[in-house]
Image (cartoon, helix red, strand yellow):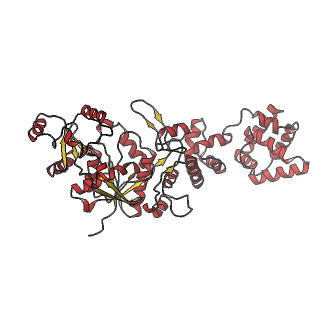
């Protein structure tokens, strides 16, 4: 038997914005496939028509594109195994529903939601299975003529898998090893609903994975309880020999306390749990996204990759290509990963430092325009080069570096009280006389002339520089003083200093 080419799929449901846990699942599928020289499919599992949310599919596609997770085939890409939306594959699924019914491996059930609810009230921990199915309204318990009459009358029904009790069902998991489940704990899950002519997730994803020749199913831990049912479906449909390998990823856990990471945790602690900003089409509520919060896509990818997987060394900063080179499912953790959102900020800071000044300057331009500032790109690059090491987000450059673009209109009271001495006005006036004729007005020349003057006069270096900084910046912050002087230039340096002398004398 020839070895099959690795094919994986990411198959989200369009029921709202893509959670960051789903993003990590997509990323791990992508890394594994690329590492193995395989292919990645984007499939939309929209069989739950009641939970469909307009705009969710487009959001998913845009979010994954922003992060650089590229698909070889799927929705918005195409491919020979389409269509890639399950709602467009109704006729394909019907033949497999019929196959299971004809083989006696599934049956038709007419129980209404009200009848099922009543049964749950009567019986604690009620489960629709081999021990209870003959008490219910289904084709196994009803006479054949009654079943036929119900179908002919157009009664709504579901198709349930018929699971035999007390069988050992083995799931081979690439992360968790061999998991053995007794079939008696499984219920006869619904596979198909006549109400909308659509299969449930359980049947649809098995049929699609088989027909799309998926070799590995890499998905979240929350789907592990479904794995034995899926193993049985592969067996019932005669596809046991082509069953994909399973890998169930660990959960992303709350930053503090126990349990799965939720949107409430993000709202409470002030970090996004969605890749892009999302506006709920019903409520109008807006949820923050990593992109709009100022995260770089490379930083988000790097951060997420290390939540539940490690490369086997101490390396933390890795490009997508490096992640692909190192990735293996064997190094994925079995236990959940705490979502350390502060570490996410650290990654963003690191990636800002790695990027060229021109690229960061281009990202900073919209923030400047928001504050009514028009500046030459070369000047913005100069400022970015001095200030980017101080920020974790590009947008924070304004708070740190606005004085390069806008002269201070007031002076920080605490800094004035501490740094502006009784002789500061006189000394800065002298300093202006010294600086005015300096040619060229560069960092080196202005610093050299100023230091020589301070030494000659016997002035206190700290007092002069602190007062000078206050005059140019408006408070006691910023990079090296003569970096500021050189960037502002002669005229602006003199103008700001003269104003400070007038206001603060």
Residue 239 location, x and y as percent? 23, 59
How many marks the image carries: the answer is 0
Residue found 81% across the figure and 33% down from its top: 504
**325 or 473: nearer the eye?**
325
Is residue 387 toward the left or the right of residue 29 in the image? right
Q: Determine which quarter of the picture holds residue 426.
A: top right
Q: Is residue 81 visible in the rendered structure shown here?
A: no
- Relative to 412, is 231 above or below? below
Q: Is residue 398 visible in the rendered structure shown here?
A: yes
Residue 164 location, x and y as percent? 23, 51
**194 or 124: nearer the eye?**
124
Is residue 334 toward the left or the right of residue 342 in the image? left
Residue 182 location, x and y as percent? 31, 54
Q: Determine which quarter of the picture holds residue 122.
A: top left
Quadrant in which the N terminus is drawn: bottom left
Residue 308 location, x and y as percent? 48, 55
Quadrant in which the C terminus is drawn: top right
């Amino acid at each position: 038997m020839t070895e099959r080419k690795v094919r994986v799929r990411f198959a989200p449901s369009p029921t709202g914005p893509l959670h960051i846990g789903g993003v990590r699942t997509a990323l791990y599928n992508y890394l594994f496939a690329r590492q193995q020289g395989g292919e990645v499919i984007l499939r939309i599992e929209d069989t739950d028509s009641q939970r469909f949310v307009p705009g969710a599919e487009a959001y998913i596609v845009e979010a994954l594109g922003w992060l650089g997770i590229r698909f070889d085939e799927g929705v918005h890409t195409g491919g020979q195994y389409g269509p890639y939306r399950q709602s467009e594959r109704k006729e394909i699924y019907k033949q497999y529903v019929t196959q299971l019914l004809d083989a006696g491996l599934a049956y038709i059930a007419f129980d209404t939601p009200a009848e099922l609810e009543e049964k749950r009230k009567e019986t604690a921990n009620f489960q629709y299975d081999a021990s209870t199915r003959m008490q219910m309204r289904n084709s196994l318990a009803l006479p054949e003529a009654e079943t036929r009459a119900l179908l002919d009358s157009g009664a709504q029904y579901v198709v349930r898998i018929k699971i035999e009790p007390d069988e050992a069902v083995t799931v081979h998991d690439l992360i968790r090893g061999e998991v053995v489940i007794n079939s008696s704990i499984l219920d006869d899950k619904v596979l198909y609903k006549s109400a909308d002519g659509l299969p449930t997730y359980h049947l649809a994803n098995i049929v699609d994975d088989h027909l799309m020749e998926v070799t590995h199913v890499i998905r979240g831990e929350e789907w592990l309880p479904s794995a034995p049912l899926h193993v049985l479906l592969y067996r019932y449909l005669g596809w046991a020999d082509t069953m994909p390998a399973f890998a169930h990823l660990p959960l992303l856990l709350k930053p503090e306390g126990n349990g799965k990471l939720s949107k409430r945790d993000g709202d409470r602690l002030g970090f996004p749990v969605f890749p892009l900003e999302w506006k709920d089409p019903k409520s109008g509520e807006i949820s923050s996204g990593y992109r709009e919060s100022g995260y770089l896509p490379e930083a988000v990818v790097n951060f997420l990759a290390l939540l539940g997987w490690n490369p086997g060394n101490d390396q933390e900063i890795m490009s997508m290509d490096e992640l692909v080179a190192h990735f293996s499912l064997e190094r994925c953790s079995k236990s959940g990963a705490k979502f350390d959102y502060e570490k996410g900020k650290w990654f963003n800071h690191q990636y800002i430092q790695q990027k060229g000044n021109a690229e960061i300057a281009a990202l900073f331009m919209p923030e400047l325009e928001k504050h009514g500032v028009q500046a030459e790109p070369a000047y913005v690059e100069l400022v970015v080069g001095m200030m980017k090491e101080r920020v974790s987000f590009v947008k924070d450059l304004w708070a740190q570096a606005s004085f390069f673009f806008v002269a201070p209109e007031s002076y920080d009271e605490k800094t004035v009280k501490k740094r502006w001495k009784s002789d500061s006005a006189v000394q800065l006036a002298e300093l202006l006389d010294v600086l005015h004729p300096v040619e060229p007005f560069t960092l080196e020349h202005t610093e050299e002339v100023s230091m020589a003057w301070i030494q000659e006069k016997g002035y206190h270096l700290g007092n002069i520089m602190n007062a000078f900084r206050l005059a140019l910046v408006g408070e006691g912050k910023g990079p090296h003083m003569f970096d500021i002087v050189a960037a502002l230039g002669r005229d602006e340096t003199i103008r700001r200093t003269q104003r400070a002398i007038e206001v603060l004398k």
